[in-house]
Amino acid sequence: MDRNSIIGLLLIGALLIGFSLWNQPSKEQLEAMKRQQDSIALVEKAKVQAELKAKAQQKKEPVAVIDSTISDSAKTAVLEQQLGSFASAASGTNDFYILENNLIRAKIAAKGGRIISLQLKKYKSFEGKPLILFEGDSSAFGLNFFSQNRTISTNNLYFTPVNTDSQKELSLRLNAGENKYIEYKYSLPDDSYLLNFSIKFNGISDLVATNTSFVDLDWQQTLMKQERDVVAERTHATVYYKYLNDEVDNLSLRSDEQKDLNTKVKWVAFKQQFFASALISKDGFESSKIESHSDEASLEKVKSYKASFRLPFSHKPEETFAMNFYFGPNHFQTLKKLDLGMENIIQLGFFGFVNRWLVIPVFNWLDSFNINYGIIILILTIMIRIILLPLTYRSFLSQAKMKVLQPEVNELNLKNADDPMKKQQDLMALYRRAGVNPLGGCIPGLLQIPILFAMFSFFPASIELRQQAFLWAKDLSTYDSIARLPFHIPFYGDHVSLFTILMTLSTLAFTAINMQMTSAANPQMKWMMYLMPIMFLGVFNSYSAGLSYYYFLSNLCGLGQQYLFKAFVDQDAIHRKIQEKKLKPVTKSKFQQRLEKMAKQRGYQLPKK
C-alpha cells in the first residue's frame, strides 16, 4: 500500500470513531431506553401471567404468580408507552347507564362508551323471555386511529359521564388531557326506535397523526336466536346497505361475503328475520367495509356481522359527526316513515310491487279492526279470489271449450300420427275455425302468478304474524307442529305440519278437478301434475304456517269456484256455438297468411276451411 492509501484508511477510521461518539446516547436517553425495556418486560410478564391464569382456570388449578409487586410508576410507564395521552383512560369504574322510552331500553357502559345491551320492550323471544337484540360480548363498537405513533382503540378505554340525570340523554367523554376529549352523545326521543348518536372530537387535532385524514369506526354484532327455527332465521338474515344517492343492496343471504363500499354510504343495517340494528349517517360515511359470516353448526348463533366506517377527520379544533341508531322491528310502515329506504330490507320477493300496493295496504286495513290474524288471512284470501274471479272464469271457459273439441283433436292426432307437422297444422286450423285459443286457459293462470309469488314472500316476512296463534298453530310466522318425529326425514324434517298436509291434499283435489277439464292427454304430464304437490309437502313443512294456511284457503276457494262455474256453464251450449262458428268464414290474419306461405314452401298444404 502506498502513502495515500494509508492516509485514506486512517481518515475513514477517524470519521467512523467520531460519528459513533457523536451519536452516543446521553444519560437521559439511556435511562429512557431502560424504562422502555422495563415496560416491555412488564408487559411480557403480564401476558404470560394472563396465559397461565387462563390455562389454570381451564384445568381448575391454582394460578401461578410471576410478579405481584409491580409499582404504580411502572404501571403508569407501561400505559404511557401504549396509550400516550389517553393513558389516564386505561383504568376506571365500569359504571352502567340506562336510556329508555316505551319502545326500547339501552344499557350503556363507561368502558368503551358503547351500548352493551339493547332490549325491544314490546317484543318477546320465542321462549317468552325479554327480547334482547345483543348483550355483552356479542357486540363491539369503537373508534380506531393513530395517535403519537400508537394505535388507539376506544372500545377498551373508560369514558367519563358528563350528565347522568336523564333517562333520555347521556354524554360520555374519553379524556386525553386538559380540554382534550372524544365525546359520545346519546339522546332517545319518546315513541321512537331511533337513538340519536354523535361523536365529537375536541382539541385532539395534534394527537391524531398529521398524515391521517380519517378515523375508523368499527361495529360488530353477533345475532342470537330469537325465533323457533334458527335455520329459517339464518336464511332471512344478512347485511343491507344504501349508498348516499343510490338504491338499497345487500350481501348474500346464502353464503359468507365481504364487500368494500368505496363511495358514500347512507346507512348499514344488520338484519335478522324480524328485527334490525342500523347505523345511519346524516351526511354519509366516506367509505365502508362490511362482512357477514354464518356458523351453520350453531343452534344459537344466527350470523356474525362486521362493519368498518371511515369518518373524515380534518384536524380542526372541534369536529362533530351526527348519526342515528335504529333498533327495532322490520315492520314495513315503521321503516317507511323513516324516509330512508329502509323498508327495502324486508324481503318482498320478485313481485314486491304486488305486496307494496295491494297486499300490505289491505292487510293493514284489516288489521285495524283488531281481529284474529287467522280471520284476517281468511278475509284476505276471499278478497284476492274475488279480484281474480274474471281471470279464473275465463280460464275455466277456455278449458271447457278445449274439452268440447277433444274428440276432434283425438281424431286428428290419429289421422296424422306419422306426420307431426301436418298434425300441428290441422290442429291450428281446427282451433281457428272453432274460435278457440289453445292458450286461453294458460294466460289467465300466468296473470295470477305475481300474486301467488307475492304471498310466498309476504307471510314469512310479516312481523305482524309473529307469535300470533290460530287454531293449533302457536305462531303463524313459523311452522305449526302437531307431532314431533323421533327421527329426521331428508327434505321433510322432524315434525308434522298439519296446515302443510291440508294444503297438499287440497292442491291434489284441485289438480284432479282441473285435469278433468283439460284436454291434455299426456300421461307423463298428468303424473307430474300430481307429483308436484307431494314434493312441495317437504318444502312447506318448515315454512310459515300462515303461508300454508293461505294456500289451503285459496285451494278451497278455487274448488268452490270450479263447482260454481260447472253449475252455470252449459257445455252443450258451448258445443253448439263452436259448431256454428265453424260454418262462418274465417278472416286470415297476416301472421296466419305468412304461416301458410312458409308451410307451402316446405311442401305442405294447409287444410281448406
Image (cartoon, grey):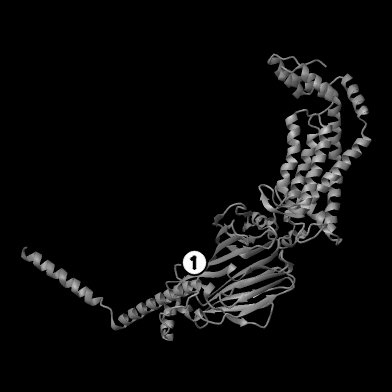
Q: Is residue 522 left or right of residue 180?
A: right
Query: Looking at this view, is 266 or 138 the one in front?
Result: 138
Q: Is residue 532 above or below residue 242?
A: above
The total of numbered circles placed on residues is 1
Residue 96: in sight, yes or no?
A: yes
Report the quarter where the N terminus lies: bottom left
**In percent of the image, x 81 and y 24: which residue is there?**
431
Q: Is residue 4 above or below residue 563?
A: below
Residue that label 1 marks: 213
- Residue 236 x %, y %: 66, 55
Task: Give the amino acid type for the residue marked by disc 1 in the picture.
Answer: Ser
Could you say whether the residue bearing mark 1 is in a helix, strand or loop?
loop
Q: Is residue 476 left or right of residue 87?
A: right
Query: Looking at this view, is 590 or 389 the one in front?
Result: 389
- Asked which quadrant contains residue 566, the reply is top right
- Residue 291 x %, y %: 56, 58
**In percent of the image, x 80 and y 22: which residue is there?**
410
Report the quarter where the C terminus lies: top right
- Residue 516 x %, y %: 83, 32
Q: Which residue is farthest left? A: 2
* Badge 1 density bin: few <14, some 14–19, many ≥20, Cα 10 Å: few
- Asked which quadrant contains residue 469, the reply is bottom right
